[in-house]
Amino acid sequence: MAIREIVKYPAPILKQKCKEVVKFDQKLAMLLDDMYETMVAADGVGLAAPQIGEAVRVAIVDMGEGQEVIEMVNPVVTAIGGSEVEVEGCLSFPGLYGEVERPFFVRIEAQERDGSLYELEAEDYEARAILHEIDHLNGVLFDSKIIRVVDPSEFEEVDEESIETEQKEGEHQ
Ligand code: CO
């Protein structure tokens, strides 16, 4: 495993539509392991393969709190529902935070690292993180969806009760 360099905007690879994974081999396993290590080192909640320079349809999301890491290979959104506006960030855009509207609910179909198919339903912040990462695989970046840029100092101005939530919302993906 290795910590890889995170590709920053405006690197062209971030705007590419990524390629389907067809080989479920050791190279894919290593990519997923590198992505996880890189995401943890950068204190992110999600990472897509193009963010470490690989234009393939692979992304991960880690909601923390003892939850298993979600590994998505060739993910496809099969249903969405509701809508919610929350603050997002992205490891490829250091220092940029903004309000983005996304579905509250998502259902996806994806493959595990061994190629087996699975279905997953998620809500709220988890759904947001999953959709943010799948956007990356289509070359869609969150800055194009920001409806209001949020200064990081705004996180500190909120009352004590909501600080924890605000900080979570401001985490990178
Ligand atoms: Co991102």
Image: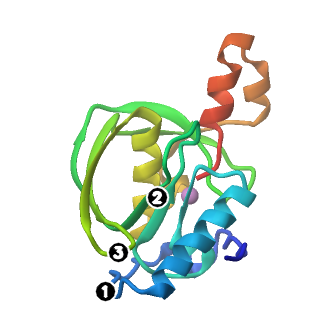
> Which image quarter: residue 112?
bottom left
As rendered, which of 86 and 29 lies closer to the eye? 29
Residue type at mark 1? Val
Question: For the residue with label 2, is its CB less than 8 Å from the closest atom of ligand 1?
Answer: yes
Q: Which residue is mark 1?
A: 22
Q: Is residue 9 above or below residue 79?
A: below
Give residue 4's position: percent from left, percent from top.
70, 75
* Kind of residue at badge 2: Glu
Dot in front, 1 or 3: 3
User: Is 167 on the left or on the right of 124, as rendered?
Assistant: right
150 in relation to 27, above or below: above
- Screen quadrant of the N terminus: bottom right
- Residue drawn 49% across the image and 60% down it: 60
Query: What's under tag 3, amino acid-wise?
Result: Asp
Query: Residue 22's x, y, as percent?
Result: 31, 86
Quadrant observed for ligand 1 in the rendered image: bottom right
Instruction: Identify the residue at image location x=75%, y=50%.
Output: 95
Q: In the image, what residue occupies the spot 53% across and 82% down?
A: 54
Q: Which numbered disc flags the more N-terminal residue, 2 or 3?
A: 3
Q: Give the numbered dot on residue 114.
A: 3
Q: Residue furthest left?
A: 78
Q: CA distance from mark 2 to mark 3?
A: 20 Å
The residue tagged 2 is 133
The kind of secondary structure element at disc 1 is: loop
In the displayed structure, 12 sits above or below 10; it is: below
Residue 110: x percent and y percent? 29, 63
